[in-house]
Amino acid sequence: MKKIILFLVLIFVFAALIPNLLPEGTSNSLYAYFLYVINFIAQNYFIFILGFIVLIIIFFRFIKFDKNYSLKKNYFLSIFQIVSLLLTAFFISYVVLLVIAIIELNVFSILININPKILGIVTDKNIIIKALKINNYPPKITANEGEGNTEPLRVSGVITGTNSFYGCYVLPSIPNFIIWPTRKSDSSTMLIDNTLIISKLNPVDLQEISPTIAYSLIQNYFPNRRIKSYPKISIMKYDDYLKYRAVDFKNGKIKIDGEIENYKKQIAAVSQLINDEENKISNNKNILEKSGLEYKNCLSNGNYSLLYCKNLLNNFNLESLNSQINNLNTKLVTDQNKLKDDNDYYDFYVGLGESLQSAQGGIPREFGTFIPKDVIRIAFNTEDSSHTIADYLETLLHEYLHYSSYVSDDRKLDDVFFEEGLTEYFARQIIKDDLNVSTNIGYPVSAKIFQQMTKRILESELADVYFSKDQAGLETLLDRVYGQNFYNDTRLAFLNLQYSSNPNQVLMIANGVMKKIGGDPLSEKDLLSTN
Ligand SMILES: [Zn+2]
C-alpha cells in the first residue's frame, strides 16, 4: 500500500514539474493544484484507467476482505481504497512540492549571498551589455517589483521556469518570512541565461543598458529591416521633462499661429479666384444672351436673310463661349470645395489655439522625446509607483522607434497622427510580445485606431511606410483599402484626434474614423492612458 502511495506521489510531483497547461483564474495554490491534478489525470486518462483496473485486480487477489462480504461489496471497498489512495497521494505530493520549493528558495538565497556567479547570475553592467550585444535575440525581461525579499523567487523562476505548475504556483506561494533574507545588491539589473531581471528603475544603470535592450527588441520584431544602433539615451527628471514640454508647447503655439496665417492667405486667394470665375461666367452669359437677342432681332427684321443672321451669330463664337462656361463651372466647383476645406482647417487651427491657451501647456502624451538625429531623452517619475518598468520600457521603445525610423528633417510623414500613432502601435506590440503585458500609456486612441487598421492592412505594409516616411505611399495604401480620397477626407479628423483635448470631441471624431475603417465604437474609458 505504501509503495502505491509513494508511486502516485512521484507521478504527481513529476507532473507538477513538467511544463504543462496551467489552471487560470485562481490564486489559491491548493485549489489550483487540485484542478491541475484532475486535468493531468484527464490528459492521461488511458494510463490512469489502466492503472485503476490493475489496482482493482490486485486488491481482489491480495487483500483479504471479510469472507462474508459479497462480491459487490468487495468491489465497492476496492474503489473506496483506490480513491483514498489518490487523495492521500494528492495531499502528500502537495506538501512535497512545498518542501522542495522552500528548500530551493533558501538554497538560492544563500547562494546569492555567497556568490551569485554559482547560479550563473551576472550583475556587472558592462558584462550584461556585452552579453546582450553578442546574442542576436532579445533578452526575456522580467520586472522584479514586488515588496520584500523577491530576488530568490525571480532567480528560481528563471532557473526552474515558470511554465510548470511548480514554477507558476508553488514557488510564488511560499511566504517571504521562511526564506533566508538576501543582501540587497547594488545592481538594479541582473542577467541569468537570457533573462534580464530588472529590480528597480535606476536612472544611471538604465541609461547605459537601454540602447542595447531597445535595439535587440526592435530588431527581433522587425527581422528583415536594418534597425539603427545606438542612440544616446539620457534620463531626465520629471521636472525637467515638464519644462521641456512647456518649451515644446510654445513652439507648438507658434506653429499653430503660422498655420492660421497660412490658411487666412489661402482663403483670401481662393475667394478671389472664385470671384473672378463667377464674374467671367456671368460675362460670358451676358454675351450669350446678347447674341441670342441680336439673332432674334435679325430674324424678325425682314431685310436680312437667314444666312446673314446665322453669320452674325457665328461672329460671337458661341462654341468657345459655351466651352469656357463649362470649364469655368468645373473650376468653380473645385475652388468652392477648396474654400470649404480651407475654412474647416482655419476653424480647426483657431479652435486648437484657443484650447491650447486654456490647457496651459497641454497634457503630456508621452514621457520621452526624440531629438534628431540620435538623442533620446526619457522622463522618469521615481516618486510615482504606478510608473512601472513595463511603462519605462514602452516609452523607451517608443522613442527608439522614432530614432530608428528617422530619415531626415525634410522627409517626414505629414501628419503627426501617423508618426505618433504608428510609433505607439509598434512599441505596444513589441512590449506585448516580449513582456507579455499590455501597456496603455501614450496616445491611447490612435493606438486603437491602428489596431483596427491592421485587421485589413498588413503590419509590414504599415512598417514599410513608417520606416521610409513615405507620405505618398501611406495615402495610396489607405485609399486602396478604405476607398478613394479616404486620406484627404479623413485628414482633418486625424489632426483633431492628435491635438484635441476635449474628451467628448475626441470620442466623437474617433468613432467617426472607426466607423469608416470598420471598427467597433470606442467608449470613454478607451480615451484614458491607463492599464
Ligand atoms: Zn512620440
Image (cartoon, rainbow, N blue to C red):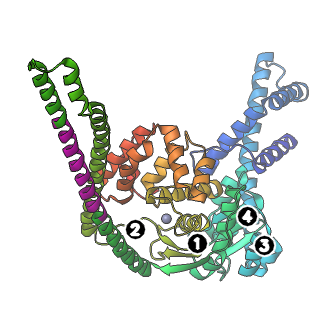
Q: Gap between marks 4 and 1, in whole Å?
A: 16 Å
Q: What is the CA distance from the residue labelled 2 to the residue labelled 3?
A: 36 Å
Per the image, the residue denoted by label 2 is: 364
Residue 263, percent from left and from top:
29, 60
Q: Which residue is mark 3?
A: 131
Quarter of the view holding residue 42 = top right
- Residue 268, horizontal then vertical, whole percent: 24, 58
The magenta stretch spans residue 239: no
> Left or right: where does residue 292 sit relative to residue 441?
left
Q: Toward the viewer: 374 or 476?
A: 476
Q: Which residue is mark 4?
A: 156
Most foreground residue, 187 or 99: 187
Question: Circle 1: is it few (<14), some (14-19), or many (20+) Cα within 10 Å?
Answer: few
Q: Amino acid at mark 3?
A: Ala
Judged from the image, the secondary structure of the residue bearing numbered disc 1 is loop
| Cα separation between marks 1 and 2 | 33 Å
Residue at disc 2, secondary structure? loop
Residue drawn at point x = 45 percent, y = 39 percent: 517
Q: Secondary structure at mark 4?
A: helix
Residue type at tag 2: Pro
Front-most of 73 and 233? 233
Of mark 1 and mark 3, the one earlier in the sequence is 3
- Quadrant holding the N terminus: top right
Label whose residue precedes the other's in the sequence (4 or 3) = 3
The dominant secondary structure in magenta is helix
Q: Secondary structure at mark 3?
A: helix
Q: Residue tagged by mark 1?
A: 148
Which dot marks residue 253? none
Mark 2 or 3: the one toward you? 2
Which contiguous range is marked in magenta?
Answer: 262-286
